[in-house]
Image (spheres, helix red, strand yellow):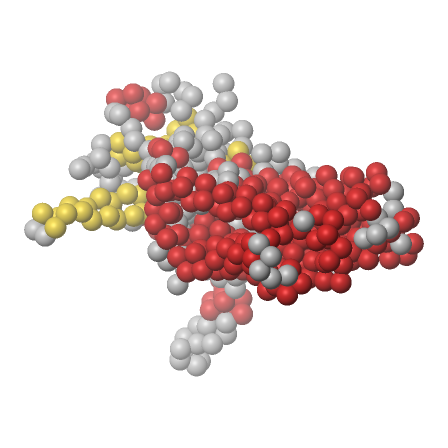
Amino acid sequence: MAKKYGMIIDLHRCVGCGACDLACKSENNTPDGIDWASHKIETYGVFPKVTYTHTPTLCNHCEDAPCVRVCPTQAMHKNEDGMVVHDPSLCIGCKSCMLADPYGVIFFNKEHAFLDYVTDDSSIVKGGTFSKKELSDKAKAPFPNFNAARGAGGYEAIRRKGAVEKCTFCNHRVTQGLAPACVVACPADARIFGDLNDEKSQISTTLRAHKPTVLLPEKGTKPKVFYIRSYN
Amino acid sequence: MMHLLWDIRVSLDLFLGGLGVGAFLVGVILYYIDAKVYDTFVKKSFVIAPLLVIAGLLLLLTELGRPLNVIKTIYAINPTSFMSIGIFLQSAFVAVALLIAFKVLTSGVESLCSKIIYAGAILAGLVGLYHGFLLSGIAKEPWNNAIPVIFFVSSILSGSSLMLLLNLESLEGLIARFKLPIIINMILTLELAAVFAWVYNLALTTASSKHAYEVLMGSFGIEFWGLSILVGLIIPMVLLTLVILGKTSLKIVAIPTFATMVLGSFFLKNLVVYLGQAV
């Protein structure tokens, strides 16, 4: 049976440290304003009876993905493992997917990401501090956190402007048998990633043990990112 | 300030494309009724129509992040995407409309083959509907299934108004033969009904659509009631009613009537494009 990857986020375990957000940025070199892994914080009530929720967010890799449905070039598509992935070489930058996405987890690259690391040769102290361009030249990488591993195998390590992008469940890692970067980085083991079609996998057994919730169930997109053990 | 993914260039594409479709269809109607009598009108319609659609498409191209990749839509077809299908429809319409325009300019209206006009009319109709389906396919609350009807009727109204403005000399003949004010008022009534059906649908269904309704009546109230409804539909309807009642002549009110209908079409389409992104 084909694999169908999904993720569980255990809200009892999540401490809201943001390590997942940072690990994603580090792994995928996402620039300012483009956060494939993020979180939302909502507060409720009136002081002194105030409570809040901290919800980590990422692409839900929906079974019935609206972004895939509306993409005019199949740039946004589902791969054989059920992940929603994006091919920037086909993207026309129409942003239909962003408008169709009810979760707000698809982003548009307005500018060449990290272009300043190639062009900016100004330094704070002339002759005393590195400019961004010097730094990348000396590091022999287009920008400091360039991830060559992600750049291999057809993925854009340096993303050019004019295309959309989003979380890929780190499929460049998954194809090598590794877990997504956010899962590895989580200090509380709050994230479980695996094959939903494998009844014995940890994700399947955990989903059977806990009643999961998903974001915006009323949208009918059948998300594959599940939340368990809400703390409210 | 509202964060827009699609700005005024998308509204202008839908507006100019609609004008082109409407202009072409009114040209087709007059061509089939009497191509000889309405020779100048038909000629202008068939020449202007593709130019308007192309102008809109060029504006849309500037909106895209990677416009050169549009060529890839030819082979990377997504049958579930209205935009993917629409690209083929618009290309086919522009090709047929340009061919007709070329023949009209070089050999005159009488040289046209009625089969190609018929093909052009079908494509124009489909493109006119596609403009609305492009939005409704995204499935945001204000971009629901009423939009294709609203946009199509708005395109007919604005396109025919533009052509009437450009053919004021043939107005008297059209009034005498077709009772033009009555026909236009009927179409204006249909558009008003479609717009109010859309608004009531927003107001009465899901929580999200109710929110869209509140934003429409709140932040977009002036654009909706003032520019789209009053300017675009009510004022021309009142002016045409005065003509029907014999209080004034169409010749006197023609310019304000048809100009407000063209403007109203833009305001309405622009409002819908922005509202969908505001909620």
Q: If the image is split into quadrants, where does the N terminus of chain B sit?
A: bottom left
On screen, residue B86 above or below B15? above
> Does residue A9 appear left or right of residue B2 in this picture?
left
User: In the displayed structure, does residue B21 sit left or right of residue A127?
Assistant: right
Q: Position of residue A15 (x, y in %)?
A: 22, 44
- Which residue sits furthest front? B246
Residue at x 40% of width, y 24% of height: A196
Of residues B126 and A139, the one drawn nearer to the viewer in this rendering: B126
Circle count: 0
A123 lies above or below A183: below
Residue depicted at x 39% and y 35%:
A219
Quadrant location of residue A90?
top right
Query: Which percent across, then down, holds residue A147?
Result: 48, 51
Q: Quadrant of residue A5?
A: top left
In the image, residue B131 lies at what x, y percent? 60, 46
Q: Quadrant of residue B132?
A: top right
Q: Is residue B183 visible?
A: yes
Q: Looking at the image, which is closer to me, A125 or A213? A: A213
Tell me if A198 is positioned left or right of B241 in this view: left
Residue A74, horizontal then vertical, whole percent: 59, 39
Task: Give the camera-side residue of B66 and B220.
Answer: B220
Residue plotted at (45% across, 26% down) = A4
**Between B67 and B249, which is closer to the camera in this rendering?**
B249
Q: Is residue B94 visible from the viewing direction of this image?
A: no
Q: Which residue is pictured at 64% across the width and 65% down the height?
A: B252
> Which residue lies most toward the left here?
A48
